[in-house]
Image (cartoon, rainbow, N blue to C red):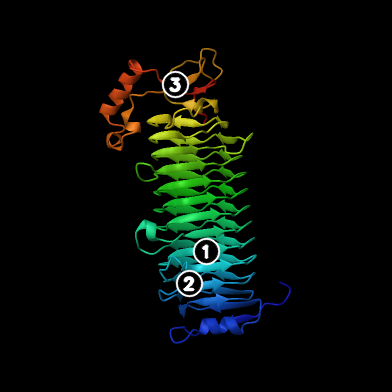
Amino acid sequence: MLKSIFILHLFMAASFANVLQEAINSAPEGSVIKLPAGVYKGNLIIDKPLSIVGKEDGVIIDGDNNGTVVRINSSYVTIKNVKIINSGSLHHQQDAGIAINGAEQCEISDVVIDDCLFGIDMQMTNNSIIQNNTIYSKDVDLGLRGDGLRLWYANDNLIKKNSLIRSRDMVVWYSHGNTIEENYGEHCRYSLHFMYAGKNYVKNNTYNFNSVGIFFMYSQDAIATGNVVKSSLGATGMGIGFKEISNFTVEDNTVLYCARGFYIDRSPFQPDTNNFINRNKILYNSEAMHFHSVSENNIIKENVFLGNIEDVINDSTGTRTYTNTFEGNFWDNYEGFDKNGDGFGDTPHKIYQYADKLWMYNPDVKFFYGSPVISLLNFLARLAPFSEPVFLIEDLKPIIKVKS
């Protein structure tokens, strides 16, 4: 902004009256309101360009368990180095720590949001920075929490180095061109959930102990690289999921200790498109790659399949899993040789599905998944199947050694 910045210093705690709201109302556009340590009354409305900055630790804005603590209805608003607590608990009002609506070029950074139903709710907010924030929801059951970070028709934002802990979801819906980088999620439901979103860049995030790590739905033209998804919880816990997505590039990610490493449902969805799943490490999952419904034309190359109980699963009949391209992957259970020393197996690696695997369809049997008894049954099914096994996939050039 071209005008000079007016700096307003507050030295009075707001336990008696909402002096912070009064300061916002009286400050000229472009002001920087610097707050000393203290507790300030929330339910603030910011409708002009200005900054609220905690000039020291211990600056708390308290919503008193009523409504949204800070509501931003203007572009060029910055909030930094404060703690925001105690929003209301009403889902139909989307009570939040911070709600931004219809704004451009805002910044929320170095903020702790605690005991707030929703964390940061961004609606129709573009070209903004959300960085270095830590967000906790209300201490209620998982399904009753609000979303820690919510983008709704919000485009071209930078979402970086935020931590969402014991929240519900981080959602990116109808939102395009966002960079989501170096964030952390723990004990949430969906750490990162896309719907009807395109051209987003998802890089170097870490998600542990959530129900689902990253789920892409009804979206296209995105890149996900360098992410680590670990220990997704429950019998259907998922590392990275696709549903009806097209033209995605998913490379150099690590997915480990999940019930399902990759879950692929009707993807790619658009005709004459591919998804590229390359150079990922898919390690020690119950199922490395689970296909559901018709999913063809995925290009799956140079991945590492190591320590998984099952490498490829197809839970539907007639879905033509073999039409996906598998090439140059490492399979720890490959039984061939490399006589010419070119680094590739001399024979293809083929995976079949046997009807004897009762655990695939019976959750009671699945309790024993990975036990010596089930391992023995699977071995016997391969040794002497009582029906023709279903051909799933073929890797024509399996690599022999994992690249360091």
**Residue denoted by label 3:** 334
Query: x and y percent of residue 384 in the render?
Result: 33, 15
| Position of 217 relative to 283 (above/below) | below
**Residue denoted by label 2:** 68
Residue at 56% over, 70% down = 79
What is the distance, in whole Å, between disc 1 and disc 2 at their CAs?
10 Å
- In front: mark 3 or mark 2? 2
Where residue 244 sits, quadrant-wise, is top right
Query: x and y percent of residue 283 in the render?
Result: 43, 35
What is the distance, in whole Å, between disc 3 and disc 2 at their CAs?
56 Å
Instruction: Look at the numbered disc 3 and give the secondary structure of its residue.
Output: loop
- In front: mark 3 or mark 1? 1
Q: Extreme front residue here? A: 318
Horizontal side of 179 relative to 211 (left or right) equals right
For the residue marked with disc 1, what is the amino acid? Asp
Instruction: Look at the numbered disc 1 and give the secondary structure of its residue.
Output: strand
For the residue marked with disc 2, what is the amino acid? Thr
> Does residue 10 appear in this view?
no
**Residue denoted by label 1:** 121
Q: Earlier in the sequence, mark 3 or mark 2?
A: 2
Are dots 1 and 2 in contact, CB under 8 Å? yes
Query: x and y percent of residue 32 in the render?
Result: 61, 76
Q: Assess disc 3: are there few (<14), some (14-19) or many (≥20) residues with their C-alpha within 10 Å of its C-alpha.
A: some
